[in-house]
Amino acid sequence: MTTYTFYSLCCKSRDITDFYIGSTTNIKNRKTQHKFHSTSPNSLKRHQLKYQCIINNGGYENWEIIELGSLEGSIRDAYHHESHLIASFNPSLNIRKPIK
């Protein structure tokens, strides 16, 4: 079994209501990845909606990751739980569902 952390990536400026929900097995590395993709001109993911929103709304330092909880289980369990969170909170920056 693996421990998955679920999180929300949201702007510190409360007038920006866009946010993203994700999951990871290593929250520290995931934070580093989000920072790289939203600050590095060499990132191949910089064009993604969530990173464009970060870039256009104060940059990475104006955004925060809020942990929503964790789950110990399989990757399928994590995808199911993340899908439930996305359906419940309707984040504007998630463009793909975790379960295909």
Image (cartoon, rainbow, N blue to C red):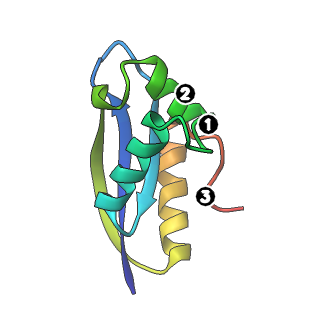
Left or right: residue 56 compared with residue 60? right
The part of the image, by quadrant, that contains residue 58 is top left
The reply to whether callout 3 and callout 1 are in contact (CB within 8 Å) is no
Query: Looking at the image, which residue sits at the far top?
Result: 15
Query: Looking at the image, which residue sits at the far right?
Result: 100
Q: Nearer the viewer, residue 42 or 9?
A: 42
**At 56% across and 41% down in the image, what residue appears?**
42
Q: Mark 3 points at which residue?
A: 98
SS for dot 2: helix
The part of the image, by quadrant, that contains residue 2 is bottom left
For the question of whether residue 92 can be seen, the reply is no
Residue type at mark 2 is Gln
Give whichever of discs 3 and 1 has the lower sequence position. 1
Query: Looking at the image, which residue sits at the far front?
Result: 42
SS for dot 3: loop
Give whichever of discs 3 and 2 has the lower sequence position. 2
The reply to whether callout 1 and callout 2 are in contact (CB within 8 Å) is yes
Residue type at mark 1 is Gln
**At 37% across and 43% down in the image, what residue appears?**
8
CA separation in Å, label 1 and label 2: 6 Å
The disc placed on residue 48 is: 1
Instruction: Give the x, y percent position of residue 87.
Output: 54, 45
Instruction: Give the x, y percent position of residue 93.
Output: 54, 34
Which mark lies nearer to you, 3 or 2?
Answer: 2
Left or right: residue 20 compared with residue 97? left
Q: In which quarter of the image is the N terminus?
A: bottom left
Q: Which of 94 and 60 is in front in this view?
A: 60
**At 48% across and 80% down in the image, what residue appears?**
74
Local packing at callout 3 (Cα closer than 10 Å; few below 14, some 14-19, many 20+) is some
The disc placed on residue 52 is: 2
Count of numbered circles on the image: 3
